[in-house]
Amino acid sequence: MACLMNHDCLRFGVVQVMFFICMSMRVFLLLPLVSQAADPDQVQDFCVAVLDTSTLGNPIINSGAFPCKPTSEVNSEDFFFDGFRTNNKKGENNTTSNEVLFGSRLTQGNVLTFPGLNTLGIAMNQVQISPGGLNPPHLHPRASECGVVITGKVLVGFVTSAGNVYYSKNLTKGQMFVIPRGLVHFQMNVGRKNALIYTAFNSQLPGAVVLPLTLFASNPLIPEEVLTKAFQVDPHILHGIRAKFGA
């Protein structure tokens, strides 16, 4: 009771309350920044993406979400995707072929090919790899990845950012793997038959940085002296590597 009559005690109490309010407001204001580290959360049942290229400069799209198709125009086909069917032309249009260079073929099921995924924070890929073929070292800047081997025998590996530790294992039918977000990884067919993998991501558009193409086939090209110094090779070796990528 004596403290309640003391102005210093009252002043100290007011300071404590103000400090608590300020810290609470700080956390509240930072919450939107934290949420931007992942795909935007959905605020409705669905938001089928409008992929009109004339809107690609829209800041909403640049933040990871596309405008929604009006609900009155949504139909059942918006929620189904047949792009993984190898005999389907739609699948071919969504396919990145590295068969000549790496012996692999990638078909993407992300928001750009399957607009119904918009705001749901998920995507899938189909990876087909010939015997001895490779899904080359790459990383996904916006998503972690898990996958399952459907057929074949596949060496899956990734390298950590701390200490460059390499983890790998040969997988066969039914075995799963996980790749932490942003880490360099690959899949290689070490069997005698074609391999088929399905991978899933916790982002509607995980992105992919394919290291061989990024380093040796960029547009414009990375300065020669940068790569020869980085890889400790002579220029003629670099020229030979670039030639394989048509650069």
Image: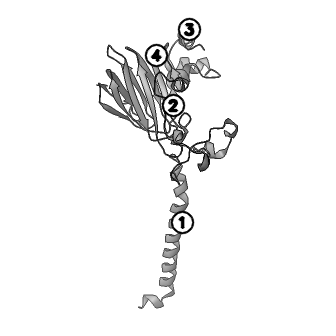
Mark 1 vs 3, N-terminal side: 1
Q: Label 4: which residue?
A: 102
Q: Nearer the viewer, residue 148 or 212?
A: 148
Mark 3 vs 2, N-terminal side: 2
Q: Label 3: which residue?
A: 236
Residue count near mark 4 (Cα–Cα under 10 Å), binned few <14, some 14–19, many ≥20: some
Q: Which mark is residue 84?
A: none
Verify CB contact (< 8 Å) between mark 1 and mark 4.
no
Check disc 3 and give the amino acid type.
His
- Percent across and percent down for residue 62 are 62, 42
- Percent across and percent down for residue 213 are 54, 21
- Percent across and percent down for residue 146 are 38, 35
Q: Is residue 230 left or right of residue 130?
A: right
Q: Label 1: which residue?
A: 25
Q: CA distance from mark 2 to mark 1?
A: 37 Å
Question: Does residue 166 appear in the picture of this structure?
Answer: no
Instruction: Please name which of the two marks, 3 or 4, marks the residue nearer to the observer.
Output: 4
- Indicate the secondary structure of the residue bearing disc 2: loop
Q: CA distance from mark 1 to mark 4?
A: 52 Å
Mark 4 vs 2, N-terminal side: 4
Q: CA distance from mark 1 to mark 3?
A: 59 Å
Check disc 2 and give the amino acid type.
Ala
Instruction: Please name which of the two marks, 1 or 3, marks the residue nearer to the observer.
Output: 1
Q: CA distance from mark 3 to mark 4?
A: 22 Å
Quadrant assignment for the C terminus: top right
